[in-house]
Amino acid sequence: MIGSLNGVVAAVGEDSALIEVGGVGYVVQAGARTLSRLSVGAQMRLFIDTHVREDAIKLYGFESEEERAWFAHLQTIPGVGAKVALGILDTLPPQALVDAIALQDKAAFARANGVGPKLAGRLAQELAAKQGPKGFVSLASAGAPRAANANGSGARAEAVSALVNLGIDQSSAARAVASAAKQFDADAPAPELIRAALKEVSR
């Protein structure tokens, strides 16, 4: 099972890239957002989700372990295959996805290619009821990307944790923090997020 590839970008296509590692070229499927950031001739590390079937082995590549973990997690929802999961991540990067789940924002999911109204509703409802994706906690050689977390990371995760410690249930805390975060132009520090989230809870 291939977990990551660290090599040279040999070519970039509409839905895949060719990554050369030690003289071997690997065809890696990827979303439009990831592909747009690849430059031919550049060194690149991609985190890989390997799909093995009777007739094919497909590699799906992501810039972060967090994205790879969400890609796998999205496919636990009935009706979501690899293509739809890539489309969702193109439209909703991990933090935006966390917010959409916390707010059960069907419209956000519906903006993704291949997601109709029924599937958008199922995604919003079922993902909110699940624990977040499970990924690697740390990968030191890759610059220690953050672990996948259903509540986001950093200040947002700290704010959710603070609200839960105050006796607010997990889903309500995540929803309040996601709503509060929209009030700030950039990522707000945890204390400000907590204050704004508490106001959301009290409404």
Image (cartoon, rainbow, N blue to C red):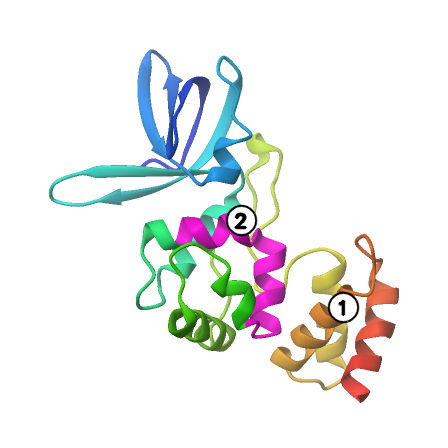
Left or right of 24? Residue 117 is right
Quadrant containing the N terminus is top left
Looking at the rendered structure, the secondary structure element under dot 2 is helix
Give the residues in magenta: 85-105
Please name the predominant secondary structure of the magenta segment in the image.
helix
Q: Position of residue 187 (x, y in %)?
A: 79, 54
Residue 57 visible? The answer is: yes
Q: Position of residue 184 (x, y in %)?
A: 83, 60
Q: Disc 1 marks which residue?
A: 159
Identify which residue is drawn at 34% across, 49% down. 83
Q: Disc 2 marks which residue?
A: 66
Question: Residue 18 colored magenta?
Answer: no
Q: Report the front residue among 181 and 68.
A: 181
Instruction: Name which of mark 2 and mark 1 comes first in the sequence.
Output: 2
Question: Residue 99 colored magenta?
Answer: yes
Q: Residues within 10 Å of mark 1 (few under 14, many from 20)?
A: many
Q: Position of residue 95 (x, y in %)?
A: 63, 56
The relative height of residue 16 versus residue 197 in the rendered view (above or below) is above
Residue type of the residue flagged with mark 2: Glu
Residue 135 visible? The answer is: no
Q: Position of residue 140 (x, y in %)?
A: 59, 35
Task: Determine the CA span between mark 2 and mark 1.
Answer: 20 Å
Left or right of 157? Residue 191 is right
Residue type of the residue flagged with mark 1: Ala
Identify which residue is drawn at 11% across, 44% down. 54
Identify which residue is drawn at 62% across, 58% down. 96
The relative height of residue 137 versus residue 122 in the rendered view (above or below) is above
Quadrant containing the C terminus is bottom right
Q: Residues within 10 Å of mark 2 (few under 14, many from 20)?
A: many
Left or right of 196? Residue 83 is left
Looking at the rendered structure, the secondary structure element under dot 1 is helix
